[in-house]
Image: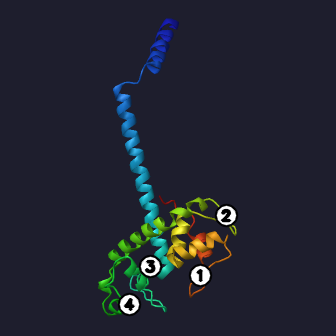
Amino acid sequence: MRKVFLTFLLIFISHICSAPNIDFRLGMIRFKSFSEFVEERYHETELSRFINDLGYSESGNNWLCVNRIGCFGEWQFDESTLKYLGHKKITLKKFKTNPEVFPRELQIEVLKTLIRVNLLILEDYEHFIGDSINGVVITKSGMIAASHLGGAGSLEKFLNSNGRINKEDILGTSIYDYLKKFRYYDLK
């Protein structure tokens, strides 16, 4: 019995200590590919959750909403923002007459474009991520939301002034409020 055990142990150890075989390498490649797939899906889910929650905060997720200062859609776009992003034909007047000129699907596309533009503008401010200003930790998702609320320039002023310049919208929501409210999303 002892010889059988030692033989089994020797075979087991030699199998572990030998060079990895092709099956092992294929397994590792598949594992890496699967891990990348899971991570990509996770970040897509986080972005989707962020977009939904931002829409809820802006309009209660009502893509037909028009506020009292003339911002419209689920994410409360201003005409000047739409023009800046290349959507010159979408105006408040046209939207009020026929909301289908700016359907929800197009609103989502415009929002994603705005997020990408704001991230490019804010590249020089990424070093603030992880810092704490007035008790709130600065995160990428918080920066995106705050830029949506008051523009990237307002966020830059907030960061550069260490929170002393804290722009508010007409309803009293500030850059700080959005940095705090939207800090928990794990966005790429």
**Disc 3 marks which residue?**
75
Q: Residues within 10 Å of mark 1 (few under 14, many from 20)?
A: some
Secondary structure, mark 4, is helix
- Who comes first in sequence, dot 1 or dot 4? 4
Which residue is located at x 49 percent, y 6 percent?
3
Residue type at the position of mark 4: Leu
Using residue 63 as the reference point, say whether residue 138 is left or right of it.
Answer: right
In this rendering, is residue 93 above or below 77?
Answer: below
The answer to whether 90 is drawn above or below residue 180 in the figure is below
Q: Nearer the viewer, residue 134 or 80?
A: 80
Task: Say which element carries label 1.
Answer: loop
Residue at 35%, 33% in the rendered image: 26
Q: Nearer the viewer, mark 1 or mark 2?
A: 2
Determine which residue is flagged by label 4: 92
* Residue 112: x %, y % from top left: 40, 69
Q: Earlier in the sequence, mark 3 or mark 4?
A: 3
Disc 2 from disc 4: Cα separation:
38 Å
Tags 3 and 4 touching, CB below 8 Å: no
Q: Can you tell which mark lies on residue 173? A: 1
Looking at the rendered image, the disc whose residue lies closer to the viewer, 3 or 4, is: 4
